[in-house]
Image (tube, rainbow, N blue to C red):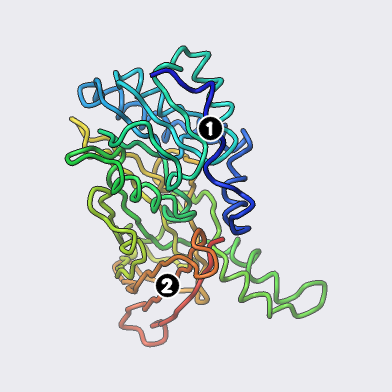
Amino acid sequence: MAETTSVPPPASDLSKMAHSEVHYFNSYNHHGIHEEMLKDEVRTKSYRDAIYQNKHLFKDKVVLDVGCGTSILSMFAVKAGAKHVIGVDMSTIIEKAREVVAVNGMSDKITLLQGKMEEVTLPFPEVDIIISEWMGYFLLYESMMDTVLWARDKYLKKGGLIFPDKATIFMAGIEDGEYKDEKIGFWDNVYGFDYSPLKATALSEPLVDTVEMKAVVTDPVAVVTFDLNTVRVEDLAFHSPFELVARRDDFVHALISWFDIEFAACHKPIRFSTGPHTKYTHWKQTVFYIKDVLTVEQGEKVVGWLTSKPNEKNRRDLDIKIEYTFETEDPTRKTTGECTYTMC
């Protein structure tokens, strides 16, 4: 089935979308964000290895690439022996993807459709495999996982595969007093004026940044795992407990989060992590500064709940709440707190 040079106009009309949706799709129009993702070797090589090392799963199969971007995953699938790949993306980068596919001689194997996944019409009634790089900051930011699940329910044949198919969110406590003072304490004295009303705003904004492993004070803990074969969209709003055990005597100024990804459907499962203990990825880690400074001793615990749900005004943003209790036999150090954040 030859294609890619002549396709219908986009199925989705940006003028009819909410401003937040337009902003989301437009953010992927520029090549810079795709360059950053392609240069992320942990990300891109993990997908490549998962596909190339499982050619027996891709041979003669119909593959759907959800949010295909520059179509690197689509081309991996063709090289692995896929019969045909359909790539879907709303952003205008798909125009360049068509050129890339053509110069690599794959126009007869890859069909690229511009539009929202929920609105385009695929040239096949069902697919054997779904591949997608859908992960956002804090795993769920931007809510693209919703789209992958919609495509799963609509197009994936019974017994079909999803690459990747498992994702786990982790947490840990860190010492970061210097930066917390710089970011949060700044508002206490701004050129001689009290700007403390903005302090709450600063605390409510998670920071996406690279955390050094030496700053991690507690053991990491898995908070929630999603199996893309079975998870439902409503399950992505979660309320999960955590227990962090201090590795050493230190201070805890913030909690951080990262995620691990697994291609469990592979003959030999492939995994990668976005945590502070491993090689850099463009997702970095998500830092949540808390109101208190916890003075912890080795073996003591910080327990609590991590809650996340889509923002009511913009479903691609996240409302996150962290409730925590520092458990210690020293009553002068025992602390209970609650912080709310909006990731936007």
Q: Position of residue 253 (x, y in %)?
A: 50, 67
> Which residue lies at the image location 48% right of the left edge and 33% below the top edge?
113
Q: Is residue 175 above or below residue 271?
A: below
For the N terminus, which image quadrant?
Answer: top left
In this view, the residue in front, 104 or 273, is 104
The answer to whether the residues at label 2 and label 1 have Cβ atoms under 8 Å apart is: no
Sort mark 2 into few (<14), some (14-19) or many (20+) by Cα contacts within 10 Å. many
Residue underneath mark 2: 322
In this view, the residue in front, 63 or 72, is 63
Identify residue type, mark 1: Pro
Q: Quadrant of residue 30?
A: top right
Identify residue type, mark 2: Ile
Q: Is residue 14 above or below residue 246?
A: above
Q: CA distance from mark 2 to mark 1?
A: 46 Å
Residue underneath mark 1: 8
Q: Identify the residue at the far front of this view.
A: 8
Q: Quadrant of residue 108?
A: top left
| Left or right of 335 in this view: 242 | left
Q: Which marked residue is nearer to the observer: mark 2 or mark 1?
A: 1
> Which residue lies at the image location 31% right of the left edge and 71% below the top edge?
300
Q: Position of residue 273 (x, y in %)?
A: 36, 43
Q: Identify the residue at the far right of this view.
A: 191
Q: What secondary structure is found at the residue carrying circle 2?
A: strand
> Which residue lies at the image location 34% right of the left edge and 47% below the top edge?
260
Q: Position of residue 204 (x, y in %)?
A: 56, 70
Q: Position of residue 272 (x, y in %)?
A: 34, 39
